Amino acid sequence: MKEQRLTDELVEERIAGAEKKLARVRDFFRRGLQSEEMSLQQAWEIISDDFLRFTLDRGLKRQLSGENYPQFVREYERAMRGEGGPDPGHVPWLFVTGRESGEAPEADRKAYYRLMRAFHVGPEFFEPVPEGMPVPDVVQVHYYNQAGIYGTHFRCVDDGGLLADEAPAGKTFVLKNELGLRAVVTIREDRRGTDRSGMDDDEVVCALKGGAAVRKAEFLAEGYIEGYTAKEERYRPDILIRLGEGGTRVNWLAYWADAKDERAAGEYPLWRDYHCWRQERCKIQDRIARSLLWGDEAGWD
């Protein structure tokens, strides 16, 4: 039987600690020491730290999809009515990470619902992205004053002959991924067959037989990536190209992006529906923060 990660004692302690933080935020606002915008931002940080990150740190991971989201909502509503037990059509949505992998026990699911209610986070906040909607795949590595380093799992379906070319340095290739996006790259260094010990800007750690180690990418190039960067006059056009599947396929591109690149990515037509969906998520997030901060000051049920 799996160990319960969210005991009643831990949950109540977390809720009480968060309420003390919220009381301080409310007090600062009423005394005119900070704006409402800052107060709402701090309220959301409390939700993130004392609920979302807390459950992750306790080894619990939420995995919702179009398949299990409807019953997740039903189970939450049943829990709020004080009705026990999973939905008849229960599909796992909360999982234990680490050595005890698998579905989390019912006690942890109930505790998770308790935290949702305490932090005013309704099921709508966790609604998954609609199936079939293209979603940008962006992983932030570092952000500096003017630009940041990002990566994307490019999942290349056509490398334009790059991997078959024995001397690609100085040549330009067009890579295409499963969404039809193109990365136009000019190879500066072909590092295949060389000692790639060392760290590139994307700081990728590889799993090796002798343990984990940083490795430089197979290719250093420059160019642009549709949907992720601007095409011309980029702050830094460097692109790192890493291979997967035993070196037979491009599956990771790392790149620098500044405000111009971010603007181009934000305006890219393929992501239009996703950005509209994200705007609705932001509205829900704002309502949650307002409800938590101002909607129930008499105490938490």
Image (tube, grey):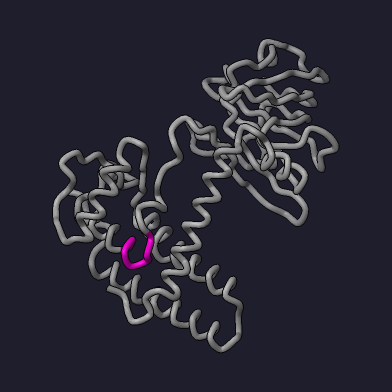
Q: What stretch is highlighted in magenta?
A: 115-121
Instruction: Pinpoint residue 222: horizontal percent, then vertical percent.
Output: 78, 30
Where residue 47 appears, as percent x and y from the top left, is: 44, 65
Image check: 186 left or right of 123?
right
Q: Residue at coordinates 28% horizontally, 72% vertically from top-left? A: 12
User: Front-most of 104 and 163?
Assistant: 104
* Above or below: residue 3 compared with residue 227: below
Magenta highlight on residue 89: no
Q: Where is residue 205 in the image (x, y as percent from the top left)?
A: 56, 39
Identity of the residue drawn at 58% across and 17% down: 157
Pick the quarter of the image with the C terminus. bottom left
Judged left or right of residue 16, residue 183 is right
Can residue 8 be seen by looking at this rendering?
A: yes
Splitting the image into 4 quarters, where does residue 264 fall?
top right
**Quick check: 255 above or below 83?**
above
Residue depicted at 74% across the width and 18% down the height: 173
The answer to whether residue 117 is magenta is: yes
Residue visible at 56% across and 44% down?
Answer: 276
